[in-house]
Image (cartoon, rainbow, N blue to C red):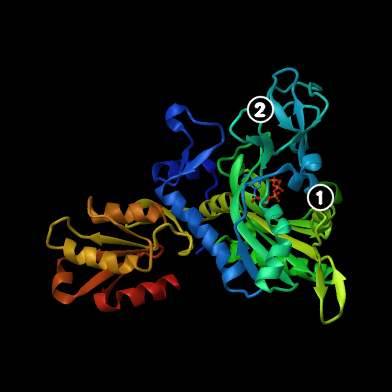
């Protein structure tokens, strides 16, 4: 069944707030514009998104390794990468209402979308998106450092280290999941664009002649990842960049785009970074960043194919796609039809009554299931209400322990999507849950 994806961002924003997925940052102080904290369920879901990426990108391959590089980096890194000179967006001010805009996102470059004034924009200024701070205890006397605007530079500056220590040979990849920071001119659309966010990036190093082949491979593989995790194919497309859109390092980029409630927008970029970064870092550091192929006796600088995705942005797309409203027994319900791998809780254990008689058995079942899965335990309110609550946060399975369970050693499993209920012996419960979740 294809869910009726949320058509209105507010539906997701409200659900996220109400059920503990996402809160505005520093809300008790009035919030902090376009910044969010992830609550009990949101933090679990973020972790699931990361793990759902690491699994096929690293764990299930023998040609990709994972690293975790520092967020703070010295200027030399971004001098070499070109970010200090080029990582800019064109900023314009409306001289009438004083609002600021990214020029390249204006529908009409002559009309202010805020106040409607014509020809009121200043000349565009190149605004560098990197956050700068100082390291050292004395203000003003420290050395300038930058918060990384992408995780990718960590892979390039560690290329030689990884090559030596991992014994990988091109074609091979270095992957990383971690926070990046950009001083975005116009953050917004909830968690779609924030100044602090998390990326999942992989640099795949290949012999130069094989670049195009691997670029096609990664475009197709990355698009399929979103489909496999439940986003309908018709809400996704692969869009090649026009030449004037390309980043300073790119010889070709395609975006995986998603149909957000406000239109098509980027989910992930797959870029051919050529040998640009390794050559730049080799030139600036004086270190050799290339590969000697002993089978051909050739030395070359590998080309890089980079799939770069966002953890938070993916989470938004998964939530929007999973959102659905339907009717069960004449009552309407809100449901997140999340893929089991992404759902914060896989199983909710629900003793029918709060009475002491049921809780030892229910607790035991909970303890067994939590050895393998993140689960919830709820023993208050009517069972119908508890099912609704679990549907709304996307829990694929509910296990109900009732008074018969004490006699027949069986429990009821309820499926989130079909609401079908089946009686299962407790001794085969873990296997049954694994079969239904698929892991
Ligand atoms: P955009 O055009 O939307 O600004 P970008 O092309 O600058 O994105 P990339 O540099 O390709 O983005 O970054 C790779 C991925 O990182 C993006 O596809 C997105 O998922 C994520 N990302 C980038 N910037 C942000 C942000 N400000 N907030 C949340 N996620 C982001």
Answer few, some or many: residues within 10 Å of disc 1's Cα (few below 14, many 20 plus, some between 14 and 19).
some
Label number found at residue 263: none
The outermost residue toward the top is: 96
On screen, 146 above or below 209?
above
User: At which x and y percent is residue 6?
Assistant: 52, 49
Q: Is residue 186 left or right of residue 205?
A: left
User: At which x and y percent is residue 184?
Assistant: 67, 37
> Which mark is nearer the camera, 1 or 2?
2
Q: Which residue is mark 1?
A: 246
* Residue sitting at x 66%, y 33%: 142
Cα–Cα span, label 1 and label 2? 36 Å
Answer few, some or many: residues within 10 Å of disc 2's Cα (few below 14, many 20 plus, some between 14 and 19).
few
* Residue sitting at x 19%, y 67%: 361
**Ligand 1 within 8 Å, label 2 CB:** no
Q: Is residue 86 left or right of residue 45?
A: right
User: At which x and y percent is residue 47?
Assistant: 49, 56
Helix, strand or loop at label 1? It is: loop
Q: Are the two marked residues, 1 and 2, in contact with CB atoms closer than 8 angstroms?
A: no
Q: Does any portion of residue 307 appear in the rendered image? A: yes
Residue 217 figure quarter? bottom right
Q: Nearer the viewer, residue 171 or 15?
A: 171
**Ligand 1 within 8 Å, label 1 CB:** no
Q: Which residue is mark 2?
A: 140
Q: Is residue 377 left or right of residue 25?
A: left
């Amino acid at each position: 069944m294809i869910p009726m994806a949320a058509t209105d961002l507010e539906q997701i924003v409200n659900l996220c707030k109400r059920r503990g997925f996402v809160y505005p940052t520093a809300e008790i102080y009035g919030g902090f514009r376009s910044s969010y904290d992830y609550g009990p369920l949101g933090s679990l879901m973020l972790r699931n998104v990361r793990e759902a990426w690491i699994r096929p990108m690293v764990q299930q391959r023998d040609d990709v390794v994972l690293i975790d590089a520092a967020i703070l980096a010295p200027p030399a890194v971004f001098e070499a990468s070109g970010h200090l000179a080029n990582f800019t967006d064109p900023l314009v001010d409306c001289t009438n209402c004083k609002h600021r805009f990214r020029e390249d996102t204006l529908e009409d470059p002559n009309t202010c979308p805020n106040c409607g004034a014509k020809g009121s924009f200043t000349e565009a200024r190149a605004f560098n998106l990197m956050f700068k701070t100082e390291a050292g205890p004395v203000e003003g006397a420290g050395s300038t450092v930058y918060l990384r605007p992408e995780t990718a530079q960590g892979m390039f500056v560690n290329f030689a280290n990884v090559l030596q220590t991992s014994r990988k040979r091109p074609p091979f990849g270095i992957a990383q999941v971690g926070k990046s920071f950009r001083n975005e001119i116009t953050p917004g659309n909830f968690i779609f664009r924030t100044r602090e966010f998390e990326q999942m990036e992989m640099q795949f190093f290949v012999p130069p002649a094989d670049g195009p082949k691997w670029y096609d491979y990664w475009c197709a593989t990355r698009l399929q990842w979103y489909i496999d995790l439940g986003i309908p194919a018709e809400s996704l497309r692969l869009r090649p960049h026009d030449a004037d859109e390309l980043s300073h390092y790119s010889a070709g980029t395609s975006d995986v785009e998603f149909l957000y409630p406000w239109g098509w927008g980027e989910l992930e970029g797959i870029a051919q970074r050529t040998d640009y970064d390794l050559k730049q870092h080799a030139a600036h550091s004086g270190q050799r960043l290339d590969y000697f192929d002993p089978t051909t006796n050739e030395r070359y600088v590998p080309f890089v194919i980079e799939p770069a995705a966002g953890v938070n942005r993916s989470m938004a797309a998964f939530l929007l796609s999973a959102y659905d409203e339907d009717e069960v027994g004449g009552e309407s319900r809100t449901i997140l039809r999340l893929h089991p791998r992404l759902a914060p809780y896989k199983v909710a254990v629900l003793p029918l009554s709060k009475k002491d008689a049921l809780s030892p058995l229910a607790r035991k079942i909970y303890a067994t299931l939590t050895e393998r899965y993140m689960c919830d335990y709820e023993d208050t309110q009517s069972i119908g209400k508890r099912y609704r609550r679990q549907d709304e946060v996307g829990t694929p399975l509910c296990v109900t322990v009732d008074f018969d369970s004490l006699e027949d050693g069986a429990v009821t499993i309820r499926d989130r999507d079909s609401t079908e209920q089946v009686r299962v012996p407790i001794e085969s419960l873990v296997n049954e849950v694994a079969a239904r979740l698929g892991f």
